[in-house]
Image (tube, rainbow, N blue to C red):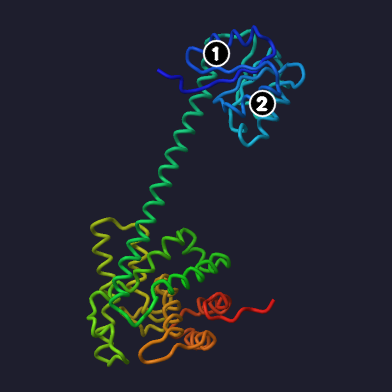
Amino acid sequence: MGKDNSILIIDDESANISGLTAILSPEYTVYASSDGQEAIETAEEFLPDVILLDVLMPGMDGYEVIAALKSSKKTRDIPVIFITGLDTAGAEEKGLALGAADYITKPFNSAIVKLRVKNQADLVNHVRALNERTTTLQQRTEKLVRLQNSMASVLANIVENRDKLTGKHVENTAAYLRILLNAMLERGLFAGEIKNWNIDVVVSSSRLHDIGKIAVSDLLLNKPGRLTAEEYETMKIHALEGETIIDNIITKSGDEDFLYSAKLFAGSHHERWDGRGYPRGLKGTDIPLHGRIMALADIYDALVSDRPYKKAFTHERAVEIILEAKGRQLDPQIVDLFLEVSDLFPGAEPQAE
C-alpha cells in the first residue's frame, strides 16, 4: 500500500531528523533538510503535504523560513508545524502570527507527533478532495451549459430554417440581450431581480423565445407581405405554443434555470407595457422582466432588418421609434437604458473620441 501523504522535516540537528523520521516514515513519505534555504527549495520541488520546522537554526531561523514559505504561491498553503524547545507564549504567538498551524515541543512524544501530523494531513486530504469534487462539478456544469447552448441553437435553427424571412433574428436578439443585461448589471438596474441570474444561461435560453413558431404553418411564416388581421391572430399563437412546448420539457426533465428562463422569454416577449400585448395582456411590471427586455431586443432587430413589407431602418431611425414606444409598448426604464448603450448596437455610428 502506497503512502498517500508526504512530510518535510526541517531541523539542523541530525538526531531530531532521525527521531522524527523513525516516528513518521511508516505512514508517510519523508523528506528532510538541515538548512533553511535548501529546505525552501525542497518544499517548492516536492510540495510536501505537511512541514515540520525547527525554530532555532543557524543561518535562516524557523521564523524566516516560514515567512518565505508563506510568501510563495507554490508553498503558502502547506501547513507548517513548529518543532521547538522554547516554551514561551511569545514564541508560540510569533509562530502562529506568521502562519504556523501547530506546535510540537521537544523532547518528542511519539504519540503526540503522530496525532498532530495526522490532524494536518487529514485536513490537507479533506481540502484536496473538496477541490477535486468542485472541479468535477465545474466540469459537469460546463458540459451542461454546452449541451444547453447546443440544444437551444439546434431548436432555434429549426425555427429559423422554416421562417426564412427573419434572417439571423435569434442570434441578433441574443447579442442585443447581452448588451442590455451587462448594462443593467453595471448600473444596478433591476438589481434585486437579476443579481442571481447566470447571464450566460439567460442569454442562451433567449434563443428559444420563438420556438412556438414550430406550430405555425410555413405558408404563414413565409408570406411575402403583411399579414391580414386573421393571419396575425393565428401568428400570435406562437407565444403560448412556445410556453407550452417548454412546459412539457420541464415536466419531463425538471424546472431548472435554463428552461425557466426560456419559458418566460417564449410566453411574454410580445406583452406590452400598456397592457395591449399578447398572449395575456399583461401590463407594466406584471410582465416578467425577461419579456420586457426581450421586447426591446425583438423590436430593434425587426426595425433594422429587411422584411417583405419594408426595408431595414437605419440604426438612428430605429432608436427614434423605440423612444416613441417608451411607456406604451416598452418599459420606460429599459428604453432609457437602451438610449445610454445604443451606440454598442450594430449599425450605430462610432462615437467620436
Q: Position of residue 341 (x, y in %)?
A: 57, 75
Q: Nearer the viewer, residue 60 or 264?
A: 60
Callout 2 secondary element: helix
The residues bearing labels 2 and 1 have C-alpha atoms spaced at a distance of 25 Å
Which residue carries the number 2 mark? 40
Give the residue displayed 61% in from the left and 79% down from the top: 350
Q: Vertical placement of 274 versus 4: above or below?
A: below
Q: Position of residue 48 (x, y in %)?
A: 56, 25
Q: Nearer the viewer, residue 35 or 338?
A: 35
Give the residue displayed 70% in from the left and 18% down from the top: 35
Which residue carries the number 1 mark? 112
The disc, 2 or 1, on the residue closer to the chain's N-terminal end is 2
Q: Quadrant of residue 288?
A: bottom left
Query: Amino acid type of disc 1?
Result: Ile
**86 sits left or right of 43 in the view:** right
Query: Amino acid type of disc 2?
Result: Ile
The disc label shown at residue 330, or none: none
Give the residue displayed 25% in from the left and 68% down from the top: 245
